[in-house]
Image (spheres, rainbow, N blue to C red):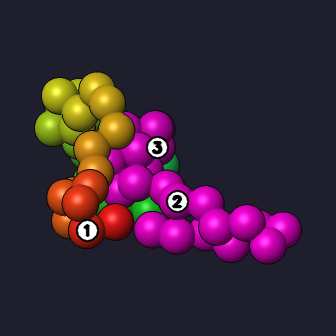
Amino acid sequence: MVNFNDGKIQSVEGADVLRFTPPDVFQLAYDVNARKINKVLSPIDETIVIGPPDEFS
């Protein structure tokens, strides 16, 4: 996900959105059980970038 702020391109990785969003927010927004979504997402403990190898950047 790419954000534009003050003329600077910033990126927010999807894994970070998942791991930093409180489970209660997922429950309110998507009607999922907060405890279950927390259990499913808890293994994500670092930023994960899925994309081309560095040689293509």
Count of number-bearing discs = 3
Residue 32 is one of the magenta-drawn residues: no
Q: Residues within 10 Å of mark 3 (few under 14, many from 20)?
A: few
Spot occupied by residue 18 in the image (x, y as percentages of width and height): 35, 47
Q: Earlier in the sequence, mark 1 or mark 2?
A: 2
Amino acid type, mark 2: Ser
Q: Is 25 situated left or right of 6 in this image? A: left
Nearer to us: label 3 or label 2: 2
Spot occupied by residue 30 in the image (x, y as percentages of width and height): 35, 63
Q: Is residue 56 above or below residue 38?
A: below
Q: Is residue 23 above or below residue 12?
A: above
Q: Which residues are magenta?
A: 1-22
Q: Is residue 39 above or below residue 8?
A: above
What is the distance, in whole Å, between disc 3 and disc 1 at their CAs? Answer: 31 Å
- Please give the name of the residue rendered at 49% of the width and 56% of the height, measured from the top-left corner: 12
Q: Which residue is mark 2?
A: 11
Amino acid type, mark 3: Thr
Q: Is residue 12 above or below residue 41?
A: below
Q: Which residue is mark 1?
A: 56
Spot occupied by residue 29 in the image (x, y as percentages of width and height): 44, 62
Q: Nearer the viewer, residue 37 or 1?
A: 1
Residue 45, quarter of picture: top left
Q: Which residue is mark 3?
A: 21
Amino acid type, mark 1: Phe
- Residue 26 seen in this snapshot: no
Q: Residues within 10 Å of mark 2 (few under 14, many from 20)?
A: few
What is the distance, in whole Å, between disc 3 and disc 2 at their CAs? Answer: 16 Å
Q: Is 23 situated left or right of 49 in this image? A: right
Circles 3 and 1: CB distance less than 8 Å? no
- Please give the name of the residue rendered at 45% of the width and 68% of the height, measured from the top-left corner: 1
